[in-house]
Image (cartoon, rainbow, N blue to C red):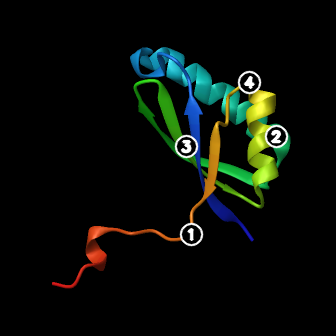
């Protein structure tokens, strides 16, 4: 069973990088994900100033850490998502 995780990465200046540099980061991430196999999947990331917030599905946190280490990315904080809250949950 897969769990959803949010990973906070502190990367100085990432928010000012051109799209070409971000594409290079995505390429590196995808290469490592291919090496690791089907136990971990990157859904998407949010880039904000000096941080990225990445959303992954994985069997366990160790696969997220292995991906970060192999790809050369920090994984400063990893939190398992326990539930999702959105505006549609509020009564009319």
Against 15, residue 61 (above or below) is below
For image coordinates 33% across by 68% down, the residue present is 86
Disc 2 crowd, CA 10 A, few/some/many (<14, 14-19, 20+)? some
Q: How many marks?
A: 4
Q: Are marks 2 and 4 in contact (CB under 8 Å)?
A: no
Q: Nearer the viewer, mark 3 or mark 1?
A: 1
Rounded to the nearest angstrom, the CA distance separating label 1 from label 2 is: 22 Å
Cα gap from disc 3 to disc 1, whole angstroms: 16 Å
Residue 2 or 8: which is nearer the viewer? 8
Q: Position of residue 17 (x, y in %)?
A: 45, 15
Q: What residue would you read off at disc 2?
A: 66
Horizontal relation, residue 21 to residue 39: left or right = left
**Nearer to me, 41 or 63:** 63
- Residue 82's label in the rendered image is 1
Dot 1 or dot 4, earlier in sequence: 4
Which numbered dot is residue 58? none
Residue that carries the numbered disc 4 in the rendered image:
72
Residue furthest to the left in view is 92
In the displayed structure, 20 sits above or below 46; it is: above
Where is the N terminus found, in terms of image quarters? bottom right
How much space separates mark 4 and mark 3, taking CA atoms? Answer: 15 Å
Identify the residue at the far bottom of this view: 91
Number of other residues with Cα within 10 Å of mark 4, as a class: few under 14, some 14 to 19, many 20 or more: few
Q: On the image, which quarter does residue 89 sit in?
A: bottom left
**Residue found 59% across the figure and 20% down from its top:** 24
Q: Does 78 appear above or below 25? A: below
Residue identifier under label 3: 54
């Amino acid at each position: 069973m897969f769990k959803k995780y949010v990973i906070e990465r502190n990367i100085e200046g990432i928010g000012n990088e051109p799209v070409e540099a971000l594409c290079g980061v995505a390429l590196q991430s995808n290469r490592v994900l291919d090496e690791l196999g089907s136990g971990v999947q990157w859904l998407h990331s949010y880039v904000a100033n000096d941080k990225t917030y990445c959303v992954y599905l994985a069997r366990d946190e160790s696969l997220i850490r292995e991906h970060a280490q192999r790809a050369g990315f920090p994984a400063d904080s990893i939190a398992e998502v326990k539930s999702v809250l959105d505006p549609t949950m509020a009564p009319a």
